[in-house]
Amino acid sequence: MNKFLGGLLEPFKALRKNPGISGTILLLDICFIASFLILQNLFGLLAASISISSFGSAVFAFTAMSALYYAILISAYSFFKLNILFCCSNLYGKPKNNSHKLLNFTILNLLIALIFFGIMLFFNFIFGGLKPNAQIGLFFAVAPFYLIYLPVVQALRP
């Protein structure tokens, strides 16, 4: 258990020793949240201004706007998180400039989002017919496994 706590507290100790990097990471997170909110408002205004004449064009417009929205959001997320990883590499040694890896990082995040979307659709299909009380019960049945998962992974870390 001591190995778990030591590994969990190590990043906080490194951040406390380097307040400039901590501030940069916080600023990047705030910029991502601001870009998310701006993007959300922009697409809300854009969606309200589109006139739709038929059901087929409505489905196409919704699908195209959703795909564009998530592509831009994942690109922004990848940009900010790659910069945060660069700042974190400053905490532990010689930093490497990873700007040339932005496209690969964005594609990785897009694939992860598609996998989670597929898993979410699968579980929605499986558990969609459950009553709301059963869904809450399922959450409380599964939550302890997630709480056990983190310490086990940390303990198995080399």
Image (cartoon, rainbow, N blue to C red):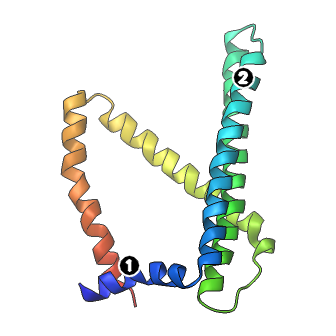
Give the SS element for disc 1. helix
* Above or below 41: residue 146: below
Q: Quadrant of the C terminus?
A: bottom left
Judged left or right of residue 12, residue 21 is: right
Residue at position x 60%, y 85% in the image: 91
Residue type at mark 2 is Ala
Q: Earlier in the sequence, mark 2 or mark 1?
A: 1
Residue type at mark 1 is Leu
The residue beneath circle 2 is: 47
Q: Residues within 10 Å of mark 1 (few under 14, many from 20)?
A: few
Residue at position x 20%, y 34% in the image: 134
> Is residue 67 in sight in this rendering?
no
* Above or below 107: residue 50: above
Q: Quadrant of the N terminus?
A: bottom left
Q: Which mark is residue 8?
A: 1
Residue at position x 51%, y 45% in the image: 117
Q: Position of residue 17 (x, y in %)?
A: 54, 85
